[in-house]
Image: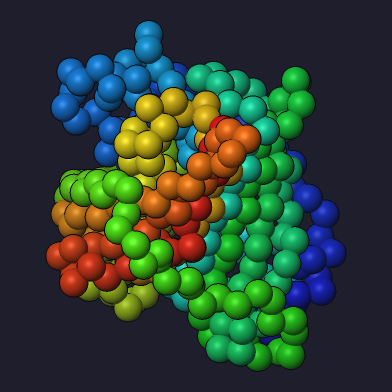
Amino acid sequence: MPIDAAEALAAGPRVREIAWDHKDVQLYHLGIGAGLPATDPRELRYTLESRLHVLPSFATVAGGGPPGVIGGLSVPGVDVDLARVLHGGQRLRLHRPVPVRGRASAASRLVAVYDKGTAAVLVLRTDVTDADGPLWTDEAEIFVRGEGGWGGERGPSARPAPPPADAPDEVVERPVREDQALLYRLSGDWNPLHADPEFAARAGFDRPVLHGLCTYGGTLKSVVDALLDGDVTRVREYRTRFTGVVYPGQTLRVRMWRSRSPVGGGTVRVAVSVPERDDAPVLADTVVRYA
Protein backbone atom coordinates (compact mmCIF):
# COMPACT_ATOMS: atom_id res chain seq x y z
CA MET A 1 0.00 0.00 0.00
CA PRO A 2 1.50 3.40 -0.99
CA ILE A 3 0.52 4.96 2.37
CA ASP A 4 1.20 3.11 5.62
CA ALA A 5 -0.54 5.38 8.13
CA ALA A 6 0.91 3.65 11.21
CA GLU A 7 4.49 3.91 9.93
CA ALA A 8 4.04 7.52 8.82
CA LEU A 9 2.63 8.65 12.17
CA ALA A 10 5.28 6.75 14.15
CA ALA A 11 8.14 8.50 12.36
CA GLY A 12 10.01 11.02 14.49
CA PRO A 13 10.19 14.71 13.63
CA ARG A 14 12.55 15.89 10.91
CA VAL A 15 14.55 18.81 12.30
CA ARG A 16 16.46 21.25 10.15
CA GLU A 17 18.08 24.61 10.65
CA ILE A 18 16.68 27.47 8.59
CA ALA A 19 17.86 31.03 7.98
CA TRP A 20 16.61 34.01 6.01
CA ASP A 21 17.35 37.68 5.46
CA HIS A 22 15.83 40.74 3.82
CA LYS A 23 16.47 39.44 0.28
CA ASP A 24 14.36 36.33 0.94
CA VAL A 25 11.55 38.47 2.36
CA GLN A 26 11.63 40.88 -0.58
CA LEU A 27 11.62 38.03 -3.12
CA TYR A 28 8.63 36.44 -1.39
CA HIS A 29 6.70 39.71 -1.34
CA LEU A 30 7.36 40.24 -5.06
CA GLY A 31 6.33 36.63 -5.69
CA ILE A 32 2.87 37.20 -4.21
CA GLY A 33 2.35 40.40 -6.19
CA ALA A 34 3.63 43.21 -3.93
CA GLY A 35 5.36 46.25 -5.36
CA LEU A 36 2.68 47.76 -7.59
CA PRO A 37 2.77 50.75 -7.90
CA ALA A 38 6.52 50.52 -7.31
CA THR A 39 6.82 53.96 -5.63
CA ASP A 40 3.71 53.69 -3.45
CA PRO A 41 4.82 54.10 0.22
CA ARG A 42 2.39 51.33 1.19
CA GLU A 43 4.12 48.95 -1.21
CA LEU A 44 7.62 50.03 -0.22
CA ARG A 45 6.95 48.46 3.18
CA TYR A 46 7.13 45.13 1.34
CA THR A 47 9.91 45.86 -1.15
CA LEU A 48 12.45 48.36 0.25
CA GLU A 49 14.96 46.97 2.77
CA SER A 50 15.14 50.20 4.79
CA ARG A 51 11.36 50.09 5.46
CA LEU A 52 10.75 46.36 5.37
CA HIS A 53 7.85 44.72 7.21
CA VAL A 54 7.42 40.93 7.00
CA LEU A 55 4.04 39.61 5.93
CA PRO A 56 3.40 36.65 8.32
CA SER A 57 2.68 34.23 5.47
CA PHE A 58 6.40 34.49 4.62
CA ALA A 59 6.70 31.81 7.31
CA THR A 60 5.54 29.24 4.75
CA VAL A 61 8.75 29.73 2.72
CA ALA A 62 11.29 30.97 5.31
CA GLY A 63 14.62 29.25 4.94
CA GLY A 64 13.67 27.87 1.55
CA GLY A 65 10.27 26.82 2.83
CA PRO A 66 9.22 24.47 5.63
CA PRO A 67 8.76 20.99 4.11
CA GLY A 68 5.12 21.66 3.23
CA VAL A 69 3.55 19.42 0.58
CA ILE A 70 6.80 17.98 -0.75
CA GLY A 71 8.11 17.32 2.76
CA GLY A 72 4.90 15.59 3.75
CA LEU A 73 5.45 13.09 0.97
CA SER A 74 9.04 12.26 1.93
CA VAL A 75 8.42 10.50 5.24
CA PRO A 76 8.52 6.76 5.99
CA GLY A 77 5.30 5.02 4.97
CA VAL A 78 4.40 7.49 2.20
CA ASP A 79 5.16 6.69 -1.46
CA VAL A 80 2.78 8.41 -3.89
CA ASP A 81 2.73 9.97 -7.36
CA LEU A 82 3.25 13.74 -7.10
CA ALA A 83 0.79 14.25 -9.98
CA ARG A 84 -1.99 12.94 -7.69
CA VAL A 85 -1.21 15.42 -4.93
CA LEU A 86 -3.08 18.64 -4.12
CA HIS A 87 -2.55 21.15 -1.34
CA GLY A 88 -5.76 20.92 0.68
CA GLY A 89 -5.35 23.56 3.36
CA GLN A 90 -2.97 25.68 5.42
CA ARG A 91 -2.95 27.01 8.97
CA LEU A 92 -0.43 29.40 10.50
CA ARG A 93 -0.22 30.47 14.15
CA LEU A 94 2.16 33.32 15.00
CA HIS A 95 3.79 33.31 18.42
CA ARG A 96 5.76 36.48 17.64
CA PRO A 97 6.16 38.75 14.60
CA VAL A 98 8.41 37.24 11.94
CA PRO A 99 11.76 39.13 11.93
CA VAL A 100 13.33 40.51 8.76
CA ARG A 101 16.30 38.21 9.27
CA GLY A 102 16.59 35.16 11.46
CA ARG A 103 17.99 31.73 12.18
CA ALA A 104 15.77 29.04 13.66
CA SER A 105 15.09 25.33 14.06
CA ALA A 106 12.13 23.81 12.18
CA ALA A 107 10.77 20.48 13.44
CA SER A 108 8.24 18.79 11.11
CA ARG A 109 6.21 15.61 11.46
CA LEU A 110 2.96 14.08 10.25
CA VAL A 111 0.35 14.48 12.99
CA ALA A 112 -2.65 12.95 11.16
CA VAL A 113 -3.42 10.62 8.26
CA TYR A 114 -7.08 10.46 7.22
CA ASP A 115 -8.86 7.98 4.95
CA LYS A 116 -11.44 9.78 2.79
CA GLY A 117 -12.31 6.68 0.78
CA THR A 118 -11.22 7.88 -2.63
CA ALA A 119 -8.29 9.87 -1.25
CA ALA A 120 -5.94 10.23 1.70
CA VAL A 121 -5.30 13.42 3.65
CA LEU A 122 -1.99 13.99 5.42
CA VAL A 123 -1.47 16.76 7.99
CA LEU A 124 2.13 17.97 8.37
CA ARG A 125 2.92 20.23 11.33
CA THR A 126 6.07 22.37 11.53
CA ASP A 127 7.11 24.10 14.76
CA VAL A 128 9.71 26.84 14.32
CA THR A 129 11.79 28.05 17.27
CA ASP A 130 14.70 30.47 17.54
CA ALA A 131 17.01 31.42 20.42
CA ASP A 132 14.21 33.46 22.03
CA GLY A 133 11.57 30.70 21.88
CA PRO A 134 8.68 29.68 19.60
CA LEU A 135 8.20 31.79 16.46
CA TRP A 136 5.37 30.10 14.56
CA THR A 137 3.50 26.82 14.02
CA ASP A 138 2.50 25.88 10.50
CA GLU A 139 0.21 23.05 9.34
CA ALA A 140 -0.17 21.86 5.76
CA GLU A 141 -3.06 19.60 4.73
CA ILE A 142 -2.06 17.37 1.80
CA PHE A 143 -4.73 15.69 -0.35
CA VAL A 144 -3.64 12.57 -2.27
CA ARG A 145 -6.14 11.38 -4.87
CA GLY A 146 -6.72 7.65 -5.21
CA GLU A 147 -4.89 6.65 -2.01
CA GLY A 148 -7.76 6.11 0.44
CA GLY A 149 -9.84 3.06 1.22
CA TRP A 150 -7.76 1.26 3.84
CA GLY A 151 -10.40 1.70 6.56
CA GLY A 152 -8.66 4.40 8.57
CA GLU A 153 -10.08 7.36 10.47
CA ARG A 154 -12.01 9.76 8.17
CA GLY A 155 -11.12 12.90 10.09
CA PRO A 156 -13.05 16.20 10.01
CA SER A 157 -15.44 17.06 7.19
CA ALA A 158 -13.80 18.51 4.11
CA ARG A 159 -16.95 20.29 2.91
CA PRO A 160 -16.30 24.07 2.93
CA ALA A 161 -18.77 26.38 4.63
CA PRO A 162 -20.47 29.01 2.43
CA PRO A 163 -19.35 32.64 2.82
CA PRO A 164 -21.52 35.01 4.90
CA ALA A 165 -24.79 36.06 3.26
CA ASP A 166 -24.44 39.77 4.07
CA ALA A 167 -22.44 42.23 1.99
CA PRO A 168 -18.69 42.16 2.61
CA ASP A 169 -16.96 44.99 4.42
CA GLU A 170 -14.31 45.19 1.72
CA VAL A 171 -13.71 43.77 -1.77
CA VAL A 172 -10.27 43.83 -3.39
CA GLU A 173 -9.39 42.56 -6.87
CA ARG A 174 -5.79 41.43 -7.36
CA PRO A 175 -4.52 40.78 -10.92
CA VAL A 176 -2.21 37.77 -11.17
CA ARG A 177 0.70 38.27 -13.57
CA GLU A 178 1.42 35.74 -16.30
CA ASP A 179 4.82 35.05 -14.75
CA GLN A 180 3.62 35.05 -11.11
CA ALA A 181 4.12 31.31 -10.56
CA LEU A 182 7.58 31.43 -12.13
CA LEU A 183 8.57 34.21 -9.75
CA TYR A 184 6.93 32.70 -6.67
CA ARG A 185 8.62 29.31 -7.10
CA LEU A 186 12.02 30.99 -6.60
CA SER A 187 11.10 31.13 -2.89
CA GLY A 188 11.45 27.34 -2.71
CA ASP A 189 8.40 25.49 -4.06
CA TRP A 190 9.78 23.72 -7.13
CA ASN A 191 6.76 21.51 -7.85
CA PRO A 192 6.70 21.27 -11.69
CA LEU A 193 2.90 21.60 -11.61
CA HIS A 194 3.45 25.36 -11.47
CA ALA A 195 5.87 25.67 -14.40
CA ASP A 196 5.92 22.61 -16.68
CA PRO A 197 2.97 22.38 -19.14
CA GLU A 198 3.53 18.66 -19.75
CA PHE A 199 3.50 17.85 -16.03
CA ALA A 200 0.41 20.03 -15.53
CA ALA A 201 -1.37 18.13 -18.32
CA ARG A 202 -0.49 14.80 -16.67
CA ALA A 203 -2.03 16.13 -13.46
CA GLY A 204 -5.25 17.02 -15.34
CA PHE A 205 -4.82 20.79 -15.83
CA ASP A 206 -4.93 22.84 -19.02
CA ARG A 207 -1.67 24.57 -18.14
CA PRO A 208 0.53 25.24 -15.09
CA VAL A 209 -1.41 26.60 -12.12
CA LEU A 210 -0.56 29.21 -9.53
CA HIS A 211 0.73 27.92 -6.20
CA GLY A 212 -2.02 27.80 -3.62
CA LEU A 213 0.37 29.40 -1.14
CA CYS A 214 0.88 32.30 -3.56
CA THR A 215 -2.88 32.93 -3.48
CA TYR A 216 -2.70 32.45 0.31
CA GLY A 217 -0.01 35.11 0.68
CA GLY A 218 -1.63 37.58 -1.69
CA THR A 219 -4.93 37.21 0.14
CA LEU A 220 -3.35 37.94 3.52
CA LYS A 221 -1.69 41.04 2.06
CA SER A 222 -5.11 42.22 0.86
CA VAL A 223 -6.55 41.82 4.36
CA VAL A 224 -3.63 43.54 6.09
CA ASP A 225 -3.65 46.46 3.67
CA ALA A 226 -7.42 46.94 3.54
CA LEU A 227 -8.49 46.27 7.14
CA LEU A 228 -5.44 46.27 9.43
CA ASP A 229 -3.89 49.60 8.40
CA GLY A 230 -0.97 47.76 6.81
CA ASP A 231 0.24 46.55 10.23
CA VAL A 232 1.58 43.02 9.68
CA THR A 233 2.30 42.56 13.41
CA ARG A 234 -1.43 42.45 14.22
CA VAL A 235 -1.91 39.04 12.56
CA ARG A 236 -2.14 36.18 15.10
CA GLU A 237 -3.52 33.30 13.04
CA TYR A 238 -4.37 32.65 9.41
CA ARG A 239 -6.03 29.56 8.00
CA THR A 240 -7.64 28.52 4.74
CA ARG A 241 -8.84 25.63 2.63
CA PHE A 242 -7.87 25.41 -1.04
CA THR A 243 -10.98 24.69 -3.11
CA GLY A 244 -9.97 25.57 -6.67
CA VAL A 245 -7.09 26.53 -8.91
CA VAL A 246 -5.91 29.89 -10.20
CA TYR A 247 -4.19 30.23 -13.55
CA PRO A 248 -1.54 32.94 -13.99
CA GLY A 249 -3.05 35.91 -15.83
CA GLN A 250 -6.39 35.68 -14.01
CA THR A 251 -7.72 37.85 -11.16
CA LEU A 252 -8.32 37.17 -7.46
CA ARG A 253 -11.51 38.67 -6.04
CA VAL A 254 -11.00 38.92 -2.27
CA ARG A 255 -14.15 39.53 -0.19
CA MET A 256 -13.77 40.30 3.54
CA TRP A 257 -16.14 40.35 6.52
CA ARG A 258 -14.74 41.78 9.77
CA SER A 259 -15.94 40.94 13.28
CA ARG A 260 -14.44 43.00 16.11
CA SER A 261 -14.03 41.63 19.60
CA PRO A 262 -15.28 43.78 22.54
CA VAL A 263 -11.93 43.21 24.27
CA GLY A 264 -9.84 44.20 21.24
CA GLY A 265 -8.79 42.60 18.00
CA GLY A 266 -11.16 40.37 16.10
CA THR A 267 -11.44 38.15 13.04
CA VAL A 268 -11.80 38.61 9.31
CA ARG A 269 -13.61 35.97 7.30
CA VAL A 270 -12.47 35.86 3.70
CA ALA A 271 -13.70 34.30 0.46
CA VAL A 272 -11.55 34.32 -2.68
CA SER A 273 -12.79 33.63 -6.20
CA VAL A 274 -11.80 34.11 -9.85
CA PRO A 275 -14.18 36.51 -11.66
CA GLU A 276 -13.03 35.33 -15.12
CA ARG A 277 -14.45 31.88 -14.31
CA ASP A 278 -17.91 32.93 -13.05
CA ASP A 279 -16.52 33.70 -9.59
CA ALA A 280 -15.27 30.14 -9.12
CA PRO A 281 -14.13 29.80 -5.46
CA VAL A 282 -10.44 29.13 -4.83
CA LEU A 283 -10.10 29.75 -1.06
CA ALA A 284 -12.80 28.86 1.45
CA ASP A 285 -13.11 28.64 5.25
CA THR A 286 -10.53 31.40 5.34
CA VAL A 287 -10.07 33.29 8.62
CA VAL A 288 -7.55 35.89 9.79
CA ARG A 289 -7.43 36.44 13.55
CA TYR A 290 -5.82 39.71 14.57
CA ALA A 291 -4.94 41.79 17.65
Q: Is residue 46 left or right of residue 242?
A: left
Count of picture labels: 0
Q: Is residue 112 left or right of residue 290?
A: right
Q: Is residue 276 visible?
A: yes
Q: What's the colour scheme? A: rainbow
Q: From where the camera sits, is residue 213 visible?
A: no
- Relative to 208, does residue 261 appear above or below in the rendering? above
- Give the residue at x 18% y 63%: 275
Compare residues 139 and 223 and report the one nearer the observer.
Answer: 223
The structure residue drawn at horizontal position 16% and vertical position 27%, both measured from the top left corner, is 37
The image quarter containing residue 15 is top right
Give how far across and how far down residue 185 sits, in percent: 37, 45
Q: Which of the two residues, 245 or 260, is positioned nearer the viewer here?
A: 260
Indicate the position of residue 142 as horizontal and vertical percent values: 56, 66
Residue 135: x and y in percent read 67, 31
Judge by depth and name the residue closer to the eye, 242 or 257.
257
Residue 154, x across and y down, in percent: 69, 82
**Rendered image quadrant of residue 41:** top left
- Residue that extends furthest to the top in the rendered view of this protein: 50
Q: Quadrant of the C terminus?
A: top right
Residue found at x 52% / y 30%: 234
